[in-house]
Amino acid sequence: MIHFEWLWAAALLPLPWVVRWVFPNVEPIQDSALLVPSIEDFSCASVISVRRSMVYIPLILAILAWLLVVLALTRPQWLGDPVALPTTGRDLMLAVDLSGSMEAQDFQLRGAVVDRLTAAKAVAADFIVRRTGDRLGLILFGQKAYIQTPLTYDRETVRTLLMESAIGLAGRETAIGDAIGLAIKRLKKQSSSSRVLILLTDGANTAGEVKPRKAAELAAEQGLKIYTIGIGADEMVLSSLFGSRIVNPSADLDEETLMAIADRTGGRYFRAHNTQELEEIYSLLDTLEPVEHDVQMFRPRSALFYWPLGMALCLASVLVMGRVLGKYGV
């Protein structure tokens, strides 16, 4: 069915006639008459008659153009059939570490060696797509924490902005406490039945104004559940001029603090040494925070105003061209 969003705009229909009534016409100049004994010599009389009848064409076009403009102003919309929209009542924030240590290439993705952030984005993107009904938000943090995407049902936008993130975008250090504090600030005023933060990092808190454990206490007071994920391999082979050596690329990972954050808020701590384990963690999170199906009805809307507006512009163009051609006697 067709719905008019601003039906009150139809009250503008008599506006041209009101303007004509308020501002009276300028009296036309009377032409002098020529008396002749016969009109036989005026063979163009029929042409003159046709031209006089054509005077009304611009008026008709102008009236039609105005009617179409008013129709466009009423914002006509086509309402589609009702669509079931599943909702969970859950607000879920993702906090992703973009610090310099995420450059470590100790993960594999589709057979290729990649850095930690690339693997984390690929797995988290699939997780986002599966979260039908959740309101999702995205926090990116390094030396500072930033809201990249506010809470929204638009999962595709959250996924796109996550995939566009880059290492060092928020600084090279790690502000875990600030990321949690920012999530608290965004979620505390929401009336959702469940508030969840999934925090992914590969290091320890080295920046920021809020200590992670203090932030966890504040989160617990606000009813915010935090799941923490520590990523990074335990062993990595480095080659140099002096041969190969085995190092621990996750030596800086503060697992104790991440476990304390999760325990304090009623969440869980997970450890991902490779891409497969990271995928399993996100699958487990789907089980711990299941997607529910409380259905709400939604009617999609398609705007139609550009059709009458486009036709009005075409008629106006015809009127302008007619005046220009008439001015030069074409």
Image (cartoon, rainbow, N blue to C red):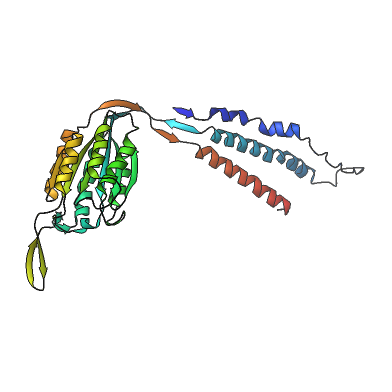
Residue 84, x across and y down, in percent: 30, 28
Q: Which of 219 and 168 is in front in this view?
A: 219
- The answer to whether residue 148 is above or below residue 114 is above
Residue 267, x across and y down, in percent: 18, 36
Seen in the image, is 202 located left or right of residue 183?
left
Residue 26, x across and y down, in percent: 81, 39
Q: Nearer the viewer, residue 4 or 240?
A: 240
Number of callouts: 0
- Name the quadrant of the N terminus: top left
Q: Which of 228 and 20 is in front in this view?
A: 228
For the view shown, which residue lies furthest in the bottom direction?
Answer: 241
Seen in the image, is 258 located left or right of residue 330?
left
Question: What residue sits 30% from the left and 44% below the top?
Answer: 138
- The answer to whether residue 232 is above or below residue 197 is below
Q: Can residue 152 be seen in this view?
A: no
Q: Nearer the viewer, residue 118 or 322?
A: 118
The quadrant holding residue 94 is top left
Q: Is residue 73 visible?
A: yes
Question: What residue sits 7% from the left and 65% below the top?
Answer: 245
The quadrant holding residue 11 is top right
Residue 151, x across and y down, in percent: 33, 38
Question: What residue sits 83% from the left and 40% below the top?
Answer: 28
